[in-house]
Amino acid sequence: MSAEKHMWWKEAVIYQIYPRSFSDSNGDGIGDLNGITSRLDYLEKLGIDVIWLSPVYQSPNDDNGYDISDYRDIMTEFGTMEDFDRMLAEAHKHHIKIVMDLVVNHTSDEHRWFVESRKSKDNPYRDYYIWKDPKDGREPTNWESCFSGSAWKYDETTGQYYLHCFSPKQPDLNWENPKVRDEVFDMMNWWCEKGIDGFRMDVISMISKEQSYPDGPLKDDGIYGDMFPYVCNGPRVHEFLQEMNRRVLSKYDIMTVGEAAGVTLEEAKKYANEEGTELGMVFHFEHTDGASEGRNVIGKWNYQPPRMPHIRQILNKWQTGLEGKAWGSLYWDNHDQPRVVSRFGNDAPQWRVLSAKMLATVLHMMKGTPYVYQGEEFGMTNMHFASVEDCNDIEAVNAYNQYVVEQKIVDEETMLKCFDAVSRDNARTPMQWDDSENAGFTSGKPWFTVNPNYKEINAAAALKDPDSIFYYYQKLISLRHSNPIIVYGQFRPLLEDSESVYAYERTLDGRTLTVAANWTEQEAACDLFDGLAGEEIISNYKEHKTGVLQPYEARVVLH
Ligand code: GLC
Ligand code: CA
């Protein structure tokens, strides 16, 4: 028996959709809800259990929907509430649940609450947001926002600054105010009553701020300070989530996953505790933010290839650290990350398929709930950005303006190299459905450039090829559904000294699953399978060699 309580969401595989780039049904070049509904057969075929929808609420799209102006309405470009209800009903018919993105650290500055809040100091909505007087004639603290520049914006009308940890069009909500919590919980209950199946909670680790608002240590740019110590995992965050749990989450059979910027293992054990008093699980960022090992050009920006032993050490720490205490989530990709096959694998034509399957094996055999990001299931790759004009993401464009144009501390070529390696835009190019014009994403002009490799890399081609990455993911997902050891088995690292091979085992009820993967394009020593009797449940090679793993070979044996 496993140490953990059995829950449906521990046994599920989640598929993330970035609606803007998924499928356009009406030719305006923007993906929409009817587009998603039309692709449910495809997703059912892949075998996933849940869709996590990036935000579909009304939004002026300063940060592509992560700036919400009405939580109870659908973004005009994405469709209507009727389209949503139909999508939800159809998804359920396809045995697929729908999890909503919950963005409640901040709203859009066009949200009714903020429009009121900024009107006057005595407006009833004033304390829905975080307003502060100037300090010595300038910003209340030296904090840098996640999207460059100060995290404070001065508002002429009342002579005060408001806090925005992201763009100035994303003012932070004041969770200290009980009315804000009432509004958020009412809204969540409203969606739950509609029949949705859970929430992915955007930067939920940032909702409680250190109330003394101190300056932060100076950052690389020499101008701004680091706000993270005072906004991540803040003093009341667990109290707020426990209240949310009592007033909303505990009333429904839903799944929750918190996006937990700055989360440590110790904090994660509280957020995702087995008693279930807060959230189901959290996303941590140690293996993605930390992949560069600090070899950054500036801020998050870097282009150094990650080293497997470093990634392994991080993931193994989380696997063993959470064991029996809290549930984890497993991901390589999402809408904020570059494409996994380009980042951790090898997207050259001769290695793309093998390395994508290898990476999928490593992730999907681990303990936790796996997430697949649209296009990952057939090996979509990073994009090339020839100039900043090719970019859409506010984070990249602002960073370029600050570091290259204004401060001149990074040259253009270096910055573009960083964009190719880690920009969020890599994940946001339109989904490559087939080899027709615009990759079958739209019959109109796509809102964002289609990756030119769509002729070779697309879903239709993958569906035709029995050896494709798609069918490999399909198999990994179905193995998880039929083998409790993959869900609940205890994790133990193996071969931790190997420079090339990532290996581990899972054990449950006297059985063992041995997993090993070669992260390099050379043969690598590995004797784990020599003389091992058992059933090979999946591998990306048909023939094996004794004593070694072939380039990017992955093997899983149950014994
Ligand atoms: C989260 C989202 C990201 C967004 C930010 C602000 O990190 O994943 O896309 O820009 O929060 O909402
Ligand atoms: Ca559309």
Image (cartoon, rainbow, N blue to C red):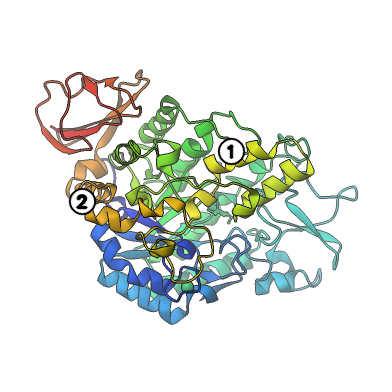
Query: What residue is shown with label 1?
Result: 417
Q: Quadrant of ligand 1?
A: bottom right
- Where residue 526 sits, quadrant-wise, is top left
Q: Could you say which is closer to the camera, residue 446 or residue 96?
A: 446
What is the secondary structure assignment of the residue under circle 1?
helix
User: Which amino acid, by three-letter code, is at mark 2?
Assistant: Ser
Quick one: label 1 or label 2, which is nearer the N terminus? 1
Q: Is residue 497 above or below residue 540?
A: above
How far apart marks 1 and 2 lie (CA) works out to 38 Å
Q: Mark number for residue 337?
A: none
* Whole-percent x, y for residue 344 in the image: 42, 36
Contact between labelled residues 2 and 1, with CB atoms less than 8 Å apart = no
In this view, the residue farthest toward the left is 533
Numbered mark located on residue 478 in the image: 2
Secondary element type, mark 2: helix
Closer to the camera in the image, 168 or 400: 400
Question: Quick check: 193 above or below 231?
Answer: below
Image-quadrant location for residue 364 = top left
In-image side of 21 versus 365 (left or right): right
Residue at left offset 16%, top offset 20%: 546
Q: Amino acid at mark 1?
A: Lys
The quarter of the rendered structure image containing the N terminus is top left
Residue 492 visible in the shown view: yes
Q: Nearer the viewer, residue 340 or 347?
A: 347
Instruction: Give the image location of residue 534, x and y in percent.
Output: 10, 31
Residue at 70% from the left image edge and 62% from the top image edge: 129
Give the class, few, some or many, for how many residues have Cα within 10 Å of label 1's Cα (few <14, many ≥20): some
Relative to 154, 178 lies left or right: left
Furthest residue in direction bottom, as rendered: 82
Q: Between tags 1 and 2, which lies in front?
A: 1
Question: Of residues 235 and 399, which is closer to you in this image?
Answer: 399
